Image (cartoon, rainbow, N blue to C red):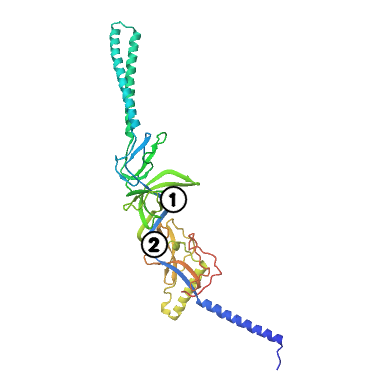
Amino acid sequence: MKKIKPQGRKLLLSFIGLLIIVAAAFIYISWIEIDKEYVFETETVKKGSVSNTITATGTLEATTTVTVGTQVSGVIEKLYVDFNAIVKKGQLIAELDKSTLQSSIENAQADLDNAEAEYDYQKANYERVKGLYEKEFVAQSDYDLAIYSYKKSKASVKSAKANLDRAARNLSYATIYSPIDGIVLNRAVDEGQTVASSMNTPELFTITNDLKEMQVEADIDEADIGMIEEQQRVEFTVDAFPDLNFEGEVSEIRLQPNESSNVITYIVIISVKNPDLKLKPGMTASITTFVEEANEVLVIPGKATRFNPDSQLLENYMNSITSNQENAENKNPRNMGEGRPERPPGGRQELGETQKVVWLKDGDHIRPVVIEIGIDGDSNIEIISGLQEGNIIVTSFAYGEDGNTNGTSKKNDDQKSPFVQERPNRKSGGGPPR
């Protein structure tokens, strides 16, 4: 018996090891291929709600806010209301010291009395001079002087009356009344404080109307303002009540633009009911405006319209179905030709603005369907025609192990026509239908 050299023995062992590795790899690959299958992600067409919304932020304000001031200077003598006080229109809320203003009235009255006395004298003098002038007993210059003095005294009386009226009006300004029914939001002065009225009116109180009706001043971006219309429904939340949704309605769209950091926004007024007085002026509101909405309509997820299967993967899947069908027909010739899958048509089909393509799944068969859509919402899309409730549509299609995709599924955000013939993807493989 020939003895094997150590070097040959090592070579033989290496060759045997390599065979074992190749056999193991072959068995593993065969097991992987057997375990692989086509995996679908599907959604059922059903009735639901769909909406198209715009989000923004805004500030809660009272519908009417009045700043109450004074037109005269003086010392605050008495305050009759405080913060959060409920007031009625015409209610006395404050008084200023009236002594100086009362003195002004007395001076104005004295000036009026003096002017009236002068007027009476000049009137009588004018009538005497007029009679003498008519009899040619006085010169023309004396008559003209009498007319001048009479008219001047008459004007002085009017001026004195106006000064008296102004002094009386200033005295009335020292008594402050509420201009509206509402609630006192702010009191800016204290008793004994001196207020000076010059170019600006001193602020005494800030009064708002009933806070059971409020408004939100929302800043809407210029890119979204074109979709905002009056009477649109609005939902919003505030930080004070994060779990509560408040509702409102668009009541006004203001045309004045606001620019901040090169960003243009427009103020949109949203009317809000506040029966429980939970909302308070100045709160920040996170707003959702419903531009379009519909309830109890057929809806599908938006990703269904963006799904477009890889052409080679689809071809392999259709071939596997056909192969299984032929094997079944060979076993039972009576079922020849029954239930064969239809191939998706080739070529390009033009779609309208409201048309999309989805893939309908019927058993093992899938095919493209052109649908007409309505509201293209944030997550769902309204179906006008092309599908029925209960239809199964494909949102993802792959060939992998236990549902893990192997990169052969293609899901593009841009809608592509499923009827366009694409070059085969050699990386895609075939396999048995699921």
**Position of residue 181 measured from the top left corner of the image (x, y, whole percent):** 30, 43
Q: Which mark is residue 188?
A: none
- Please tell me how many numbered marks the rendered image carries: 2
Name the kind of residue labelled 2 in the image. Val
Give SS at disc 2: strand
Task: Name the quarter where the N terminus is drawn.
Answer: bottom right
Relative to 411, is 198 on the left or the right? left
Give SS at disc 1: loop
Relative to 422, is 144 on the left or the right? left
Mark 2, Cα crowd under 10 Å, few <14 / some 14-19 / many 20+, is: many
Q: Is residue 166 visible?
A: no
Name the kind of residue labelled 1 in the image. Asp
Q: Nearer the viewer, residue 14 or 137?
A: 137
The quadrant where residue 155 appears: top left
The residue that disc 2 covers is 299
Q: Nearer the viewer, residue 216 or 224?
A: 216
**Position of residue 210 measured from the top left corner of the image (x, y, whole percent):** 32, 47
**Position of residue 42 measured from the top left corner of the image (x, y, whole percent):** 43, 68
Viewer-nearest of discs 2 and 1: 1
Q: Nearer the viewer, residue 329 or 405?
A: 405
Q: Is residue 213 visible?
A: yes
Q: Nearer the viewer, residue 81 or 231?
A: 81
Q: Which residue is drawn at the image coordinates 45% and 44% (left, top)? A: 258
Q: Relative to 113, say whether 305 is above or below.
A: below
Q: Which residue is drawn at the image coordinates 71% and 91% (left, top)? A: 3
The residue that disc 1 covers is 224
Mark 2 or mark 1, earlier in chain: 1
Residues tagged 2 and 1 counted as in contact (Cβ below 8 A): no
